[in-house]
Image (cartoon, coloured by chain):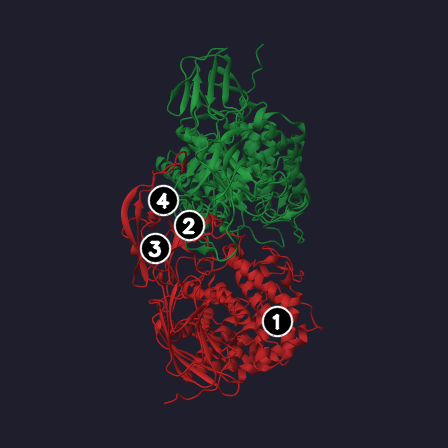
Chain colours: A red, B green
């Protein structure tokens, strides 16, 4: 029996050219396994949690207040809170695009009506500006976030369009985008937003609606940045990447979320305008950022101050800021570069970042989130109460909500759109980038269709089995071979970073890739001063950590790993051998002579980093000193 | 020929009891050598520099505006800028107390008149509050700094009184202190200042004027802190040490300058009220802070965020904030504990902090200052222009002035008062704590006097020669033996941390301590993750560093020190042997396998940390990876 053919749906990024072509969001169905469990928690807990909080803190009601036309001083939240609502709608929209959900559809519809009511006749939309008693429109490009908010509105609209829903929200977005083009076009205000985001949003909406003027407006914003249009602020022009033209920069710098969002928009513009120089520049910036300014978790942004990148190789594990949203920004960039270039190393980055930075943020119950994702916590941090609104800069414990609540709905939209990142086509070859059980369908113009079933317990187990369910036309298949992996192939042939199925796929064909998932020791570049003399333990795509909840042999800082003993797998983690050393006597801590490093032999149990902090306040470290 | 006997003068801290008694500021004359050169630069360049800047940015004119009684929106600078003026006066006053200086006296007199004109009839004095158009008095204890400013006024007055000058400024301070006692006494406002400082200021002024009520007021402020009187702020109650009662805390935490100033006031109160429990508590806090939260330079405060202490052993060299003012606060605490306990380890801390944290701040020309004092700078930082006002958080380059210009006048007052920290008496024994060429006179009730001459080229050379010039009465002598030193003694006997001259000092007696000044390797406590696998090189009291200006063998981060080769002295620095390794190829920086560490043999020249950054922008590191 043949499964019914669905219409191909949209996806978050649909470049008009590039080596790889995205599938539609509903072309991949994740069934069971790691990500299905995560997405279920997202659907059942995190999305309702965000809706409940955005309601209770007033972000949603702000639209009704704006619609009423008077700010009685009652507007709630920070100036960018509209974007929280748009991100939540985007999460709901991707979720419903994957599998139609009448509850979510009803919520989207209601929210869209509230938003539409607040939109001005000329398309302007923001609850913080422009009403009597509020600051005037476009009076604060540094911090006002008006264009940033539009960007998230546009991305939400793209998610609606992806499911074929040209609804109220899309209408709002279209009017807002038209307004932006009128206001900020070639003859308009020469300005940019302090927080990049509108660029990628305009490009995506332009692609989804076939509106070249939106893409041209994105191009203008990209071209304008880096010329000092924004006024100086405490953290310098590099905070919002206004220090250098985008095409002249050599590395990501400044605020990490802003950097990722900007690069995403720049790639979109480069692709759509055929600007290969801009594409190459942004790719080189990202490659250099991966080589010098990225944590082993995929996290980015090493400084709390300015939530920013530090210098090259300034990657402290303890004060790592690694904002969850910056990890999402990095996936946005990596995905665009993967589509443009076909280079599977970007799929490696996406995998690493998804498992170790983004999946680490939500608690197992989906109702608390890490904002910062440090790789070491020395002292267990107080756990906030379930109704406590926390500062963003706290680290070491998850919180239900934040004064700047960008991360929770960002995680929600990322997990909701996850099927889009699993596979692509390269002409008539399907490429499988991420390993999750489920079904994949790919279509070619003319009706040729390939339908695959993927079975795997990845990342707990390394076997990935791909079965061809149906195949009409001339399809072939390739699987990413992770850069860190040694693999055994059945029915597949190694070709660089791919495991390739030679010949035409036929129904019933079975291909197997066995990825070695034994825990392995990973050494840092010696220029990363902060983790000298340490190793990390990785298992498959997972970075592991030592958490005090698993340690009965004294403080986890006293553990010294014995690298001559091979780590052994244990559940989704590992056992490692080493010694527990005694700390030196108290006193002046800088002395002549090498400190003693004796200690009793112990074994330490490591767990996946993404699972840490789910058993109450604890200490944790990813990088383990060598014995 | 007998030198003329001067009247004994005052000093910054004059406890009514304790193991050691301070000398007067003019009882020690620093003649030549390291500190004389520094103090000359301070007198001839830094003090005029501060006066010029405080004039040009308007801090001084603020008093005239306040005297005029109207704020036409023209007040300049931050809310605590009055304190910058008081600290400058204090610097001038100590300088003139050491050697009467009619230019400085004229400047002090003029400034004091301007300040006096701004004082309200009830003693209130602040240029930021209380005038029409300004916020009301005492409406912002968290950030207003009114009491903090009084504290600096009081310390300036103490410096005037130390020279026997009961002048206009002292009158202003007396009226302000009376006002504080009226306003915040037992029957007054139950409040504390967000920035501790008034406590030590009141205690010192109380001692200098014999006013027990001032000391009682200081006691009240100390007793009130830690009970949540200050409203919550972003960085938490610990930022201003209002999280725990002073006597219950176990370690310095929060804003590092605040922590040091608070502890100083608490020790003063403990001594004057005989509160041995409070003294023991603060001493234990400081000891723990030295053991776990202090840099090898003596610097304190590891986080830029909140300018604060981090967790125990969180001591990153690159992002070390190590505010210059926090080092001064640490000296204030260590000096009080030295006087109270006689424990020379506190004199070690003072020496280390003076040479490696405080002396590092001013440029060699005395007209630019480090605000933060990191122990590693990877990328040379842009050098600000001579008329550029910099943000405090910049690091890696000295600046002429800052938006929060607390450090320059603080350094100026520290260097101006330096003679006070050189020696003490312990009954009829003189203790020499700091080694500088010069003359020292000590007096006992009844007229007995000891006059010493000290000859040394310390810290360039380890020989300290003390000659008794005159001695009336029964005097003995002891020299500190630095904790890091091996010494050879001539005419002296080792007794714990002291080198003691047995018997009664006679004119013409010569005592010699030869301190081994060979460069030595120093290893960090293994719990300091950020410098694992590294050593520092120290020479005498000086922490050395590798600066890129001295490196022709590639980036300084590629140097690996060979600890099997003994470092050799070179000028005030050292030569060390090692290898220059090649960095790995660009790419993902976390790989299986131990990174290669080959490289060509090189020698590296190290210079004193306090001298770094005087040859234009450069990279620098104190902690050197081992080969």
For residue A362, what is the image quadrant?
A: bottom left
A42 or A565, nearer to the observer: A565
Q: Check disc 3: other Cα within 10 Å, few if <14, some if 14-19, many if 20+.
A: many
> Which mark is on residue B248?
4
Q: Nearer the viewer, mark 3 or mark 2?
A: 2
User: In the rendering, at what x and y percent does residue B455 appear?
Assistant: 54, 19
> Which mark is on residue B156?
none
- What residue does disc 3 label? A546
User: In the rendering, at what x and y percent does residue A145 appear?
Assistant: 58, 67
Q: CA distance from mark 1 to mark 3?
A: 43 Å
- What residue does disc 2 label? B594
B386 or B267, nearer to the observer: B386
Of callouts 1 and 3, the N-terminal one: 1
Q: Check disc 4: other Cα within 10 Å, few if <14, some if 14-19, many if 20+.
A: few
Q: Nearer the viewer, mark 3 or mark 4?
A: 3
Could you confirm whether marks 2 and 4 are on the same chain? Answer: yes
**As displayed, is residue A364 above or below residue A232?**
below
User: In the rendering, at what x and y percent does residue A511 appear?
Assistant: 38, 75
Q: CA distance from mark 3 to mark 4?
A: 32 Å
Element under disc 3: strand
Could you confirm whether marks 4 and 1 are on the same chain? Answer: no
Label 2–label 1 contact, CB within 8 A: no
The answer for which chain carries disc 4 is B
Which residue is at a point 61% across and 36% down the rendered structure image? Answer: B89
- What residue does disc 1 label? A269
Q: Is residue A549 left or right of residue A56?
A: left
For residue B176, what is the image quadrant?
A: top right
Label 1–label 3 contact, CB within 8 A: no
User: In the rendering, at what x and y percent does residue A100 appear?
Assistant: 43, 84
A107 or A482, nearer to the observer: A482
């Amino acid at each position: 029996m043949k499964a019914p053919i669905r219409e191909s749906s949209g996806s978050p990024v649909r470049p008009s050219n590039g080596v790889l072509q995205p599938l539609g969001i509903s072309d991949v169905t994740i069934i069971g396994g790691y990500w299905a469990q995560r997405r279920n928690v997202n659907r059942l807990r995190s999305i309702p949690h965000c809706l409940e909080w955005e309601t209770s803190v007033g972000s949603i009601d702000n639209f009704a207040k704006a619609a009423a036309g008077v700010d009685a001083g009652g507007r709630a939240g920070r100036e960018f809170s509209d974007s929280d609502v748009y991100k939540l709608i985007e999460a709901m929209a991707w979720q419903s695009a994957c599998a139609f959900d009448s509850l979510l559809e009803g919520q989207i519809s209601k929210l869209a009506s509230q938003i539409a009511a607040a939109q001005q006749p000329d398309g302007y939309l923001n609850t913080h500006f422009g009403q009597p008693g509020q600051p005037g429109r476009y009076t604060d490009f540094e911090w006002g976030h008006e264009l940033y908010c539009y960007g998230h509105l546009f991305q939400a609209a793209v998610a609606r369009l992806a499911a074929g829903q040209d609804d109220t929200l899309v209408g709002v977005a279209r009017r807002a985008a038209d307004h932006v083009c009128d206001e900020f076009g070639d003859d308009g205000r020469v300005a940019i937003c302090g927080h990049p985001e509108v660029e990628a949003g305009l490009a995506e909406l332009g692609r989804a609606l076939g509106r070249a003027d939106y893409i041209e407006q994105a191009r203008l914003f990209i071209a304008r940045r880096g010329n000092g249009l924004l006024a100086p602020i405490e953290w310098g022009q590099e905070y919002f990447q206004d220090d250098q033209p985008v095409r002249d920069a050599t590395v990501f710098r400044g605020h990490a979320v802003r950097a990722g969002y900007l690069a995403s928009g720049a790639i979109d513009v480069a692709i759509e305008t055929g600007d290969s120089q801009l594409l190459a520049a942004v790719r080189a910036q990202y490659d250099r950022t991966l080589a010098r300014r990225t944590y082993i978790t995929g996290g980015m942004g090493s400084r709390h101050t300015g939530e920013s990148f530090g210098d090259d190789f300034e990657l402290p594990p303890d004060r790592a800021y690694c904002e969850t949203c910056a990890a999402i920004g990095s996936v946005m960039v990596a995905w665009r570069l993967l589509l443009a270039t076909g280079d599977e190393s970007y799929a490696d980055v996406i995998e690493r970042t998804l498992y170790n930075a983004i999946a680490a943020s939500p608690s197992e119950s989906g109702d608390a989130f890490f904002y910062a994702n440090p790789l070491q916590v020395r002292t267990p941090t107080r756990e906030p109460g379930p109704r406590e609104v926390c500062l963003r800069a706290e680290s070491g414990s998850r919180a239900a909500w934040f004064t700047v609540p960008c991360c929770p709905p960002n995680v929600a939209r990322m997990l909701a759109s996850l099927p889009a990142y699993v596979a692509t086509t390269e002409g008539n070859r399907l490429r499988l980038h991420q390993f999750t059980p489920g079904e994949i369908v790919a279509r070619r113009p003319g009706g040729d269709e390939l339908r695959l079933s993927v079975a795997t317990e990845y990342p707990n187990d390394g076997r990935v089995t791909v079965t061809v369910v149906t195949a009409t036309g001339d399809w072939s298949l390739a699987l990413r071979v992770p850069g860190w992996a040694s693999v055994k192939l059945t029915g597949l042939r190694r070709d660089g970073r791919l495991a390739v199925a030679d010949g035409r796929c036929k129904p019933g064909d079975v291909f197997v890739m066995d990825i070695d998932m034994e825990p392995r020791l990973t050494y840092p570049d010696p220029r990363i001063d902060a983790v000298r003399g340490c190793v990390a333990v990785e298992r498959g795509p997972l970075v592991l950590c030592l958490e005090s909840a698993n340690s009965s042999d004294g403080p986890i800082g006293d553990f010294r790993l014995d690298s001559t003993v091979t780590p052994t797998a244990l559940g989704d983690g590992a056992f490692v051998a080493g010694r527990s050393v005694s700390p030196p006597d108290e006193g002046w801590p800088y002395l002549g002579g090498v400190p003693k490093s004796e200690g009793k032999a112990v074994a330490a149990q490591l767990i996946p980093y993404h699972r840490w902090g789910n058993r109450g306040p604890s200490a944790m470290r990813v990088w383990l000193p060598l014995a």
